[in-house]
Amino acid sequence: MAATVGNQDPEGIARALRGVVRGEVDFSAAARALMTMDASNYRRVPVGVVAPRDADDVEAVLAVCREHGVPVVARGGGTSIAGQATGTGVVMDFTRHMNRIVDIDPDVRTAVIQPGVVLDRLQEAAAPHGLRFGPDPSTHSRCTLGGMIGNNSCGSHSVAYGTTADNVRSLSAVVRQSGGDFRQRTLGRGWQGAPDSLRPLIEGELALLRTGFPDLPRRISGYAADALLPENGVDLARFLCGTEGTLGIVTEATVRLVEAPRARALAVLAYADESAAAEAAAGLLPYGPLTVEGMAADLVREQAGLPKGGAWLFVETGGDTAAQARARAEAIVRAAAGGTTDSLIVDDAAGQRALWHIREDASGTATRMPDGTEAWPGWEDCAVPPARLGPYLRDFRGLLAQHGLRGTPYGHFGDGCIHVRIDFDLLSETGVRRFRHFSEDLADLVVAHGGSLSGEHGDGQARAELLPKMYGPELVDLFGRIKDAWDPDGLLNPGMLVRPARLDENLRFAVLPRGPVDVEFAYPHDGGDFSAAVRRCVGVAKCRTESAPSGGVMCPSFRVTGEEAHSTRGRARLLHEMLAGEVVTDGWQSTEVRDALDLCLSCKGCRTDCPVGVDMATYKAEFLHHHYEGRRRPAAHYSMGWLPRWLRAVQHARVAGAVNAVARVEPLAALGKRLGGIASERKIPRVAAETFSAGWRRELRRRVQAARRGGAARSGGDGPEVVLWPDTFTEHLAPQVGRAAVRVLEAAGLSVLPPPTRVFDDKPDGLAAVARLLPSRRGRVCCGLTYVSTGQLDRARAVLRRTLDLMRPVIDAGLPVVVLEPSCAAALRTDLPELLPDDPRARRLADSVLTFAQALERLAPHWDPPRVDRPAVGQTHCHQHAVLGDADERRLRERAGLEGELSGGCCGLAGNFGFEEGHYDVSVACAEEQLLPAVRAAGEGAVVLADGFSCRTQLEQLAPEGGRPGRHLAEVLAEALGITP
């Protein structure tokens, strides 16, 4: 009888566990909410979460749970897509403590690892020995070896190295003994460690085992009981791979390592369509490729770098030398030439990585149809014999059309294994019925082609109910008897593989509100539905990478803390549960959601780096708005959130000098920081004695007077007019950046104008309008950034409406607006139209925004910047990366002779975040990840570039004494022009 938690006492279970477990025992609402889902369509609410420290803890957990009749689920990275990493009992999280590489033996080519080891960490440890672990799913940067063993994962290199089961030598697992106790045993070849009843059970069904399994390279479904046949060496370790934690809990594994090719080349073969690519894949296998991956054009956001075609095969080759690898790739291109439309061979590492990112991101890209419609897993990885892949795909497409569904197959064409996300409607009863009927029909189709319901990710709940179609009732009954031999109490991951839940039960969408949620942002990419925005997170967990992706940002706080709650996925899960109201019950007043969002830097990295475009910065602002609506806010929301207001007050009162003097008196500064909710470790930035606009007005007056006397009206050129946006940071804290930008833009021939400071009914007419604009101090444009980041959205909306009123003549004239501060430019591009979606001026102003580099490249394309000819280090601003893109900046730096790549990640200051009390340590750790090491390692002549005020401030406050300050690109170019602003 399966274990349940229906009438159990969670507090009593937690007390019992805390009495015997050395690891963390967490039965809080937040911990449970974080573990309700994996990357599948399913949701189960656990009773609690345990992070075991060692095998003894695992034994203790199982003993307590057996006593209380509570099921147990083993969980790694939570990237499973069939529901097997969810459960209603106790979830054991192996990523926190049991994540060590115990040993690597390069002589025998093995590694001993714990189940929580992330695959990329093992690859990094093996690389110095010229070795690697063969299988590599696309989630390799965050999936764990324990999860790979549980699911028998494969990945793109399985045509060369096989499945995880092919690469496991032995397993240490906690299994049930004949007396009922759970003990750790070593399982390899032979019957030692198995239940006493298993051998007679297997030996009594030899005929069935010899005839009941299809011969496939990617047969993952069901229990691989044929591994226990005598002719197969009675391989218990191989058999346990793919059992999804239903028979025992792996605590350590000895795995095989393979020799990594010294050189690689990537042949990308283009075909007219996916069917042509699928037909060709099997014919390339005799050439010994390392991969044969396929995908179609509708999964590619941008086809830059890909040869022309409607579908592609990514065929990787290896060799002892680059020439050998390339020669093998060329041989494959020649062999495929008859059917391809184009081809490309890439043998440099950077180029290969860029192309592989396109393929790996498909798991997220596929969750949205080209028109934005949601698409879901469920039939993610069935496999057929590779030679049958072409006909199968044609029949599959026909079945989709028959059911009125859409999906784009991609995946491991060389193994006949196909991934696909389908636009199931899992929110309505009609849609769920269609999901079920399609699943039943597709299972019949896969079996008709001699295939396996799962070819990589396991059956879980998504496919286990349909296993009788593949194996027949006798073999499925045998699976049940095997389960009972290992787990007679039904304690281990019940509902998976054997006696499964129905495939249309426990759907994670069922608990979400059906009506619209009252929100402030427009969520234009989600139909205005906040629930749909939260549903974007499908759990592929790219945000959980332990080291920053090359050039990427997401998710800096997770990389510092390692906590699921501080990942983009974790925060999305908590928002999901907030909307569901079952575990997180306080709605917008939830402290669980508030605490998880507290360490979100609002860096916006997830907006671009997340394959499905989760925008946690916007969700955070939305939540904070509702959470504090009508309530007292944290002090930092008033001090930092109202920063534009305070700085304007300092300007109008002409007390900048006094403010700076007070900030240098430590007791007074400490008091001010305490009252303002600012971290005591932070220094208060110096306020400029004269604002940028004041100095600019003075200069413009001088020019007007000169024009009246018949002199030169301006020092700028007669080129296009642009309006230079005086953002709060440039205006009050770094006016030298604005002055430098004016000089450079004018040197490029542009006519630079200030924005209006009072409302006009007519349009500005170049410098003639400037004189009318100068005397007024009635209004200042503002992007509302500080109000948005602190969730003061009513105030942000009011500020933005005033800004639109002021900017109306600029908008009507269609003038470009140059914004020097990347975070302010990003706010105008995204937050403005999403907070004021009904005001057409908002979209027009957003579309007019240009960065400094974009203005020079697009409006002065023939201008040659001065040559700096020095190496450059620094960091691309996170908002620049996420919203604006940095291609123009890269080209401008290259033309100016500023050599070198800027680092990714986030500086950690992130506007108000790094100044807020309680955030200092995380802020510093973020800076130490990439930015500070890059600056320290730079040579004496290097230029430190930092276009964001936050980035420059972080460098100033954390760099060692005598360190070089960060500078805006405009400052560097102005200096090279011989102009001292």
Image (cartoon, grey):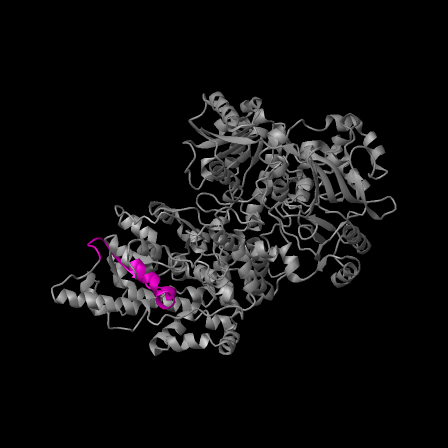
Residue beneath the point at 27% across and 50% down: 859
Q: How many marks?
A: 0
Res 563 quadrant in image: bottom right
Q: Is residue 775 left or right of residue 925?
A: left
* Residue span colored magenta: 716-742
Image position, residue 353 (x, y; %): 50, 39
Image position, residue 709 (x, y; %): 12, 67
Residue 938 against residue 238 in the figure, above or below: below
Residue 548 against residue 291 in the figure, above or below: below
Q: Is residue 921 left or right of residue 941?
A: right
**Viewer-nearest residue: 196 or 495:** 196
Can residue 811 be seen here? The reply is yes
Residue 232 against residue 596 in the figure, above or below: above
**Viewer-nearest residue: 817 or 853:** 853
Image position, residue 734 (x, y; %): 37, 65
Q: Quadrant of the C terminus?
A: bottom left
Q: Is residue 825 left or right of residue 586?
A: left
**Viewer-nearest residue: 661 or 407:** 661
Q: Is residue 288 left or right of residue 145?
A: left
Residue beneath the point at 54% across and 22% down: 283
Can residue 516 be seen here? The reply is no
Image position, residue 291 (x, y; %): 56, 31
Q: Is residue 732 magenta?
A: yes
